[in-house]
Amino acid sequence: MTVSPGLRIGAMVAVDTLREALRGRLAWLLVTLAAGGFALSAFLGALALTETRETQAALLAALLRFACAAIVAVYVVASIVREAHDKQAEMLLALPAGRGAWLLGRLAGFALLAMLAALPAGLLTCALAAPAQAVLWTTGLLCELWIVAVFAAFCALGLGHAAPALCATGGFYLLARSAAVLQWLAHDATQRTPDAGQRFIGAAADMIAFLLPGLDGFARAEWLLYGTGTAADLGAVLAQTAIFLTLLTAACLVDLHRRRF
């Protein structure tokens, strides 16, 4: 069976992306993060007077979630910006058929990188929570990392520099994590002071919550603490992930095809 050039290019780029991450000692960083996070959560959990196991699980989940998102975002932005400055991808991007293959290969490599980051986090949570809930939490974390990776790639391609791309990615992540809280605060203020300014703020909060993925519901700590995760939660996470990955990938493709090399 003949393999198309685009598929071959995409597979080559994906493998090179993962190989580059492993050469950069990503595995050691993830092991250090897992060990340090577990030790820190155990220490802080031991300080709790009651519900020591629950406190340890909540702290560990929060620490791993933010750390994994930061690692993925930094690596994605640094990888794309470095490749752009080194002119390594110009030959592929100059070919009309190579642009999509290069991008999809890069995103596939970043997806594998997110899996490498989510796997040790999931294994650690299995020691502190029910296995089914730990699997649900890990799936939510993986979907969250995929969205962060694709958005970071979009920012790196569009802005071309590491600092603004990382700032944009960090702002997107924090806003997506807190959009529901901002929405609730805005509507609570509108009920107490129903003037035009507060109604505008409430409408703006609703628009932000509609446009951004609800990352606050992707890997919820209460799933690990109280076992409240359900199949409906998993379906909502997967649906949002599919929608936003499709939109962000399309935006990256449009940006690439508009450029001249």
Image (cartoon, helix red, strand yellow):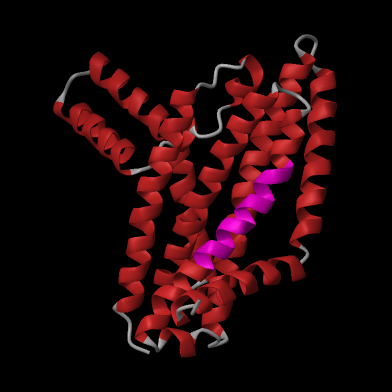
- In this view, the residue farthest toward the top is 50
Does the magenta segment cover residue 109? yes
Residue at 85% of width from left, 28% of height from top? 43
Rendered image quadrant of residue 183: top left
Query: Residue 172 vs residue 68: left or right?
Result: left
- In this view, the residue farthest toward the front is 1
Query: Residue 69 vs residue 161: left or right?
Result: right
Question: Exactly how many numbered labels are in the figure?
Answer: 0
Give the position of the C terminus as an image quadrant. bottom left
Residue at 33% of width from left, 87% of height from top? 260
Bounds of the magenta span? 106-120
In-front residue for pair 91/158: 91
Q: Is residue 107 visible?
A: yes
Q: Where residue 11 sits in the image (x, y, percent)?
A: 55, 72
Q: Main secondary structure of the magenta part?
A: helix
Q: Is residue 88 above or below residue 30?
A: below
Residue at 83% of width from left, 42% of height from top? 35
Q: Where residue 78 sits in the image (x, y, percent)?
A: 59, 69
In-front residue for pair 199/154: 154
Does the magenta segment cover residue 52? no
Q: Is residue 160 visible?
A: no
Q: Where residue 22 sits in the image (x, y, percent)?
A: 74, 66
